[in-house]
């Protein structure tokens, strides 16, 4: 099988997106309590701590899992949908905080999720393809 430019570029973008997401989780998990405390403080007066605290404890693990799955190319479609929905939640939170600079970055991630989902047919180099039923 000859690799097309579309397949190669898709794999590179998917793995890069995975590395970015996994990296977010990797740096936050070891300092989970500090990260969660910072989020609670940031949302003080905007959202109740009872809502922010559980989300802040789950977010780094979600980021890590989404990133790892994207790197591997396993459950790619579902992972892209979960990642896109996560971005929607993060964008809403950033808007509530009026952190427009965060929204801009999150919109870039959202666009990349769109691109990866839209061109999923080019996902040739992925574990998904090794376990498809013939």
Image: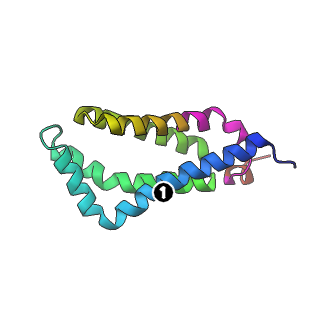
Nearest to the observer: residue 35 or residue 127: 35
Nearest to the observer: residue 50 or residue 18: 18
Report whether 17 appears left or right of 24.
Answer: right
**Place of residue 46 in the rendered image (x, y in percent of width and height, measured from the top left):** 16, 37
The way the protein has been coloured in the rendering is: rainbow
Magenta segment: 113-127
The extreme left residue here reads: 45
**Place of residue 127 in the rendered image (x, y in percent of width and height, measured from the top left):** 68, 54
Disc 1 target residue: 22
Magenta stretch contains residue 114? yes
- The secondary element bearing badge 1 is classed as helix
**Place of residue 105 in the rendered image (x, y in percent of width and height, measured from the top left):** 41, 39
Report whether 51 appears left or right of 104.
Answer: left
Q: Residue at x 48, y 40 (%)?
A: 109
Q: Residue at x 58, y 51 (%)?
A: 16
Q: Residue at x 73, y 48 (%)?
A: 132
Q: Residue at x 68, y 43 (%)?
A: 10
Quadrant of the rendered structure where residue 106 is? Answer: top left
The extreme right residue here reads: 1
Report whether 31 appears left or right of 115.
Answer: left
């Amino acid at each position: 099988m000859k690799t097309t430019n579309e397949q190669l570029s898709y794999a590179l973008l998917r793995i890069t997106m995975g590395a970015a997401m996994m990296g977010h989780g990797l740096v936050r998990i070891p300092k989970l309590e500090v990260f969660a405390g910072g989020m609670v403080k940031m949302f003080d007066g905007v959202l109740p701590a009872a809502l922010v605290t559980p989300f802040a404890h789950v977010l780094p693990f979600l980021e890590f899992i989404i990133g790892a799955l994207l790197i591997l190319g396993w459950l790619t479609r579902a992972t892209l949908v979960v990642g896109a929905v996560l971005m929607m939640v993060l964008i809403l939170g950033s808007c509530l905080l009026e952190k427009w600079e965060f929204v801009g970055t999150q919109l870039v991630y959202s666009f990349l999720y769109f691109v990866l989902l839209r061109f999923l047919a080019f996902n040739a180099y992925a574990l998904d393809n090794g376990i498809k039923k013939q």
